[in-house]
Image (cartoon, grey):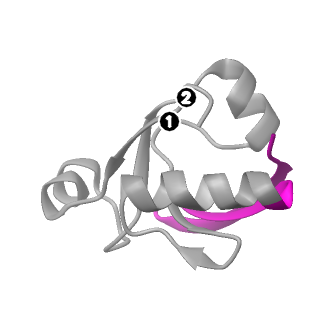
């Protein structure tokens, strides 16, 4: 994950952060260079990678590993209560 730190979205995390989604992995720290390369930022909730649902931080790690094998990732995520999508190459 290149230094990105994530936590599983739980009921407590949802309430604390005002997250709409009932699943996902919350990014709580991400290096600047990774932000620029991916379009993701701290506070984003990753919901899906390459059509694979992300329900936990462990799911996210597995999905990124699979994406690395494919060479690219399309990521659906929640930011400020809105659904967004980004795509990038994975090494």
**Residue at image point 17% right, 57% down:** 15
The segment highlighted magenta reads: 70-91
The secondary structure that most of the magenta stretch takes on is strand
Asked whether, in this view, residue 56 is left or right of residue 30, the answer is left
Q: Are marks 1 and 2 in contact (CB under 8 Å)?
A: yes
Q: Secondary structure at mark 2?
A: loop
Residue 4: x and y in percent read 53, 32
First reached walking from the N terminus: tag 1 or tag 2: 2
User: Mark 1 = which residue?
Assistant: 42
Mark-to-mark CA distance, 1 and 2: 6 Å
| Extreme-left residue of the structure | 12
Residue 48: x and y in percent read 58, 70
User: Mark 2 = which residue?
Assistant: 30
Q: Is residue 41 above or below residue 45?
A: above
Residue 44: x and y in percent read 50, 49
How many numbered marks does the figure carry? Answer: 2
């Amino acid at each position: 994950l290149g230094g990105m730190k994530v936590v599983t979205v739980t009921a407590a995390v949802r309430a604390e952060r005002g997250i709409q989604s009932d699943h996902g992995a919350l990014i709580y720290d991400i290096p600047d260079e990774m932000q620029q390369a991916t379009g993701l930022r701290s506070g984003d909730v990753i919901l899906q990678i390459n059509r694979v649902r992300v329900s936990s931080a462990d799911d996210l790690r597995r999905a990124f590993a699979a994406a690395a094998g494919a060479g690219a990732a399309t990521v659906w995520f929640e930011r400020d209560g809105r659904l967004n999508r980004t795509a990038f190459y994975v090494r």
